[in-house]
Amino acid sequence: MLTLRTHESIDGIAASDWDALAADDNPFTRHAFLAGLERTGCIRAAFGWRAQHLTLHDDDTLLGAVPLYVKANSHGEYVFDWAWADAWERAGGDYYPKFLCAVPYSPVTGPRLLVGDGADADVRRRTLATALRELTDRAGLSSLHVDFLRDEDIAAFDDAWLERSDWQFQWRNPGGWRDFQDYLDALTHKRRSAIRRERQQVAGAGVACEFRDGGALDEDDWRSMHHLYTHTFDEKGNTPTLTLEFFRHLGAAFPHHSHVAFARRDRGIIAGALFLSSHDTLYGRYWGAREAVPGLHFELCYYQGIDHCLRAGLHRFEPGAQGLHKLARGFLPARTHSRHYIADAGFRAAIRAALKREAALLEARGRELLAHSPFAERGRDR
C-alpha cells in the first residue's frame, strides 16, 4: 500500500536509501550535504527554514523522496518571488509560510523528485508532484515552489503548476579542449588578450594561487575559508548562514568533491573560493578576500575553476547565480527551470499571465546574450 510521510529532519531517512533514490553524484542532493546543513545549524527557524521532507513508501520500502522545507521568507533562494509575496500581502493574504523544494542556499540544478532509475520512475515522479500540490492545500499554505529542477522531473508537473525559467551562466567544454590554452584559443582575440592581462595582473601583484581538495585541508585552512566567506556577507550587510562546522563537514563528507582555491601573498592567505564537484561538473559557491587585488576575483572564482575542469576531465562548470561579467569569460547562458503551485486560483491566474510576459522577455534576453558570445566563429576573429 502506497503511503506518504513527512520528516522534520532528513536524519529520519536512511542515508543509503536516500542516496539510492538520488541516483547520481550531484553533491547537493546527497544525504550527507542536506544532513550537514541541518546538523550544523544552517537550517533553523531564525533563518526562516524548517525541514519537512516528503517520502513515498510501499509498506516499508522507500520509493521516492523530496527535499522539502517550510519557508518563513524568501532568503537563501535564487528564484525570486519577492514581488509575488508583496502582491499577495497587499491583497490581504499571507504569502508566508510557503513550501520550497530546493537545496538551501544553492542555485544548482539537480534532482528534486528522487525516485531512482526503475522502470516506473516517471509514475513515481507524477505521484510525488501530485502529493506536493495536495500537501500544500491540506496545510493551507499559499504556495509550493520547486526550484532548479532537472529535465527528467519537468513532465511530472501538470497544468496546475506554473512554469518559470531563467538564464544562468555556465562554462562547458565542447569535448576537444585539453588545457587552458585550448580554451583561450577558442576565444576571440580581444577576449583572449583580456583574460591573459587579468591573470598577469594577479601574478604581477605577487599572488600565488592553489586549488586543493577539501580532504587535504586542515583546521586552519577551513577557518580561513569560513572567515573569508563571512567577510563577504558582512560587507554586503547580509547574514552568513553557513557555519564553520558545515565547512568542516564538507571536507570530511566530500574529501575529493569539495575544493578550495586559495590566493596567497607573502605566505599569508588573502582570498579563497569554495567549490563542490560531481563526476562531470564543478560548482562554484562562495568567495571572499581580505585584500583588493585587480583581477583576483576572476582568477579564483573562474580561471582556477576552468583550469581544474580541464585537468580533471569535468565537462561543465556552474559558478553560481547572476553575474553578467561571466559571459565575457566563456560562461554562456544556460536555461534553468522551476515550477510553482499557487493555491489561490485567482492569484495563480494573475501570476500565470505575468510569467507569460516574462517568458517572452527572457527569450529576447537569451538571444541578446548569445549575440555577445566571447568565442570566435570558426575561421574568423582568431
Image (cartoon, helix red, strand yellow):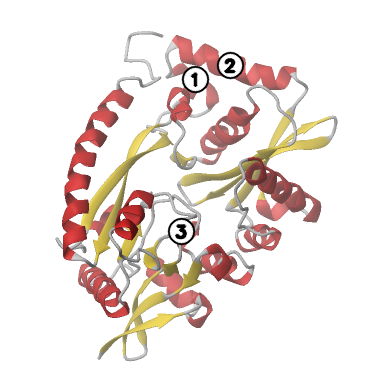
Q: Earlier in the sequence, mark 1 or mark 3?
A: 3
Q: Secondary structure at mark 1?
A: helix
Q: Quick check: 317 above or below 378? A: below
What is the x, y in percent for residue 22?
40, 66
Q: Residues within 10 Å of mark 3 (few under 14, many from 20)?
A: some
Q: CA distance from mark 1 to mark 3?
A: 30 Å
Specify the quadrant that holds the N terminus: bottom left
What residue is shown with label 1? 184
**Is 10 on the left-hand or right-hand side of 23?**
right
What is the x, y in percent for residue 248?
69, 60
What residue is shown with label 3? 25
**In the drawing, what numbered circle is on residue 332?**
none
What residue is shown with label 2? 196
Specify the quadrant that holds the C terminus: top left
Q: Secondary structure at mark 3?
A: loop
Q: Residues within 10 Å of mark 2 (few under 14, many from 20)?
A: few
Looking at the image, which residue is at 34% across and 8% down? 380
Q: Quadrant of residue 63?
A: bottom left
Front residue of this view, candidates 326 and 171: 326
